[in-house]
Image (cartoon, grey):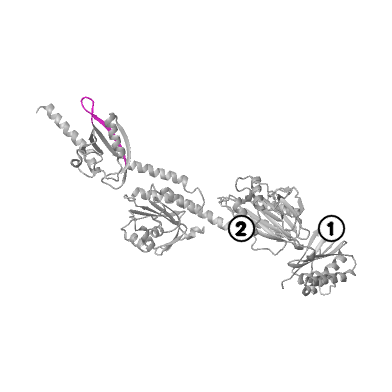
Amino acid sequence: MDPGSAGGEDDRVLVEWAFRQASFSMSVFDAEQRYVRLNDTASGVMGVGEEVLRGRFFPAGVPEDVDQTGTLEALRDVAATGKPVHYESYTRAPSGIREHAWNLEMWPIRGPAGEVRAVGMAAFDSSEQHWARQRLAVLDEAAVSIGTTLDLGRTAQQLADLVVPRFADFASVDLLEAVMRGEEPTTDQPDTPVVLRRMAHCSTVRGTPEAVIELGASDTYPAYSPPARALSSRQAVLSASGDPDFDRWIASAPARAEKILGFTVTSLLAVPLIARGTTLGVAILLRLRPDPFNEDDFNLAKELAGRAALCVDNARRYSRERITALTLQESLLPHGPSQQSAVDVACRYLPTDSQAGIGGDWFDIIPLSGARVALVVGDVVGHGIHASAHMGRLRTAVQTLADVDLPPDELLAHLDDLVLRLGADADNGEQAGSGETSASCLYAVYDPVSRKLTVSSAGHPPPVLVLPDGTTSVIEVTPGPVLGVGGLPFEATELEVPEGSLIALFSDGLVEATDHDPDLGYARLRRVLADPQASLETHCDQILTALLPAHPADDVALVLARTTALDADHVRTWDLAADFAGVAAARRQALAQLDAWGLAEIGFVTELVVSELVTNAIRYGAEPIQLRLIHDHALICEVSDGNPTSPHMRRARMFDEGGRGLLLVAQLTTRWGTRHTPAGKTIWTEQSLHQ
């Protein structure tokens, strides 16, 4: 053989070796897509030798559950058009169980005349690059999709939804019970069972049949179970069907064993949720697909769990602050009905569901002298514990000022001064002007004797009045500035309302909840109020349902008050002359009225009270002098005169001839006090009728 011939033979051998030993899969198909050649790598991918497939039509040798339709169409296109094709597929290799990403290059092999005689195909396994891109995509999505809310349940569900189906076939997020209460949990006992609450789960199968625990339910995990081991060791735990601890855990509960019976868990990954050094719970990831979790999956799961744990901890801290603020808020609001009969009342306080936190809305029903009642609704600017604390200070101040029996406009003026002082303290002695301690307030006083309603507003939405015939109107209240501005007066609006009228007081969160348009909110509220209901409690619930969304963005306070009236049968009034001789007549008239009311048993005390108060009015007061008895839940005795000077109770010394009268009145009655009027003052007492 000549040298050229020998060299050509050697080249063909080298080419054959190169084909056989190539590190990537190479195959040759004829124009009808029959196997012609496969190198060693291609044979390894197919799981059979070249001699088995040669002459057979593609996709012979490919399992039926592996879709190769796209590859077959690409081979036909190259054979028909003579143009090379780049094709990407994501399937498992016939010889393996794990999904692979393939980059396929196909080109025509032409004969001497340029005709397509065969098709060459080179397959490059780009799975590592593909999975690396997928992991980065998951991490990028986690950064924007987890933690968009401060709700524990929704945050946990975001993690579960992210990893299924791209990373796991089933995922659950279970949190320690202390986390649900906003507390910092402890997991210092590694050999004891742990109780976890299911906050989220997700599955590739409709209905999440793998879930043994219902959402919101708690379950006890034995110390040897993968989730409990992950919590105690603070390390991710990998397990699967066939692992002794896994099988023992599944078999420990019949319900769990029955659920898992139809599934083969190829891989379970329990990853602890740890944030800021605190273990909060565990994320459980299951794979039912053939390929188990590998080292890269392990690292990705830990990264995702770390990010999710920070979001869960933020939600926990928010929950703790919200629970604290809500507890403080509820402790500062009225509890149970007040001792008054001027109005029938139903009240509601609904905290916000927003991330801003609990606001400073409040309401109050304050019994006043003379059978009157004060209705109060207020709203402190801001949210959180500070707003609740500020609300508590204002509510206490309103109750104190109401006890002095100030008119509504004067009460708001004093309250405005208090808010200014509180703002100055918050600004280290500087004048408050930032509005951080401002608040709105509506203060209304209803008198069941005169049926008059007096209302003053400090930047608060006006109330709605519903007459007994169903007619509704917004009470035209002259709006004053919000509390904390200072320098501007407040005005009072007075109107007479029929018995049985309904007064609705509320915070702005009620009428601005849906579309931030108060006019539309008022229109909706008036329509609901015009619809009569069996009870005020039902009416409150109907109003909240009709006007508020599922997750209100602001707090809501609502007070519904139906007015009553005290007619002449319950009220008696006598005008008295400034003559001491009239004291005895006043006593006789009072005793006669008590007999008419069937209250003769309290006649002795009432006689002493009337005698003392009328005598003081004649001695120290001025005309006109008037005595009034009111038969309500208590017996109210009032003596009015034209002198605005208030009496003061003092302890008389041993040899003093006077000074014991008011002390005696205070000892014999339930309550007593002074109320200033435009004509002077009124001294009043209350005697309980329920001994």
Q: Is residue 634 magenta?
A: no
Q: Secondary structure at mark 2?
A: helix
Tell me the distance, in whole angstroms, between the alpha carbons under discs 1 and 2.
40 Å
Which segment did they paint magenta? 101-117
Q: Is residue 279 above or below residue 614?
A: above
Q: Secondary structure at mark 1?
A: loop
Main SS of the magenta segment? strand
Q: Quadrant of the C terminus?
A: bottom right
Measured as percent of width and height from the top left, residue 587 is found at 84, 71
Measured as percent of width and height from the top left, residue 105 is found at 29, 34
Check disc 1: other Cα within 10 Å, few if <14, some if 14-19, many if 20+: few
Q: Earlier in the sequence, mark 1 or mark 2?
A: 2
Q: Quadrant of the N terminus?
A: top left
Q: Is residue 106 magenta?
A: yes
User: In the image shown, does 436 or 530 lie closer to the viewer?
Assistant: 530
- The quarter holding residue 253 reads bottom left
Q: Which residue is mark 2?
A: 329
Name the residue at the top extreme: 113
Check disc 2: other Cα within 10 Å, few if <14, some if 14-19, many if 20+: many
User: In the image shown, does 602 or 194 lie closer to the viewer?
Assistant: 602
Measured as percent of width and height from the top left, residue 544 is found at 61, 53
Q: Which residue is mark 1?
A: 679
Left or right, 145 with respect to 574, comes to: left
Q: Which amino acid type is marked by label 2?
A: Gln
Numbered-mark total = 2
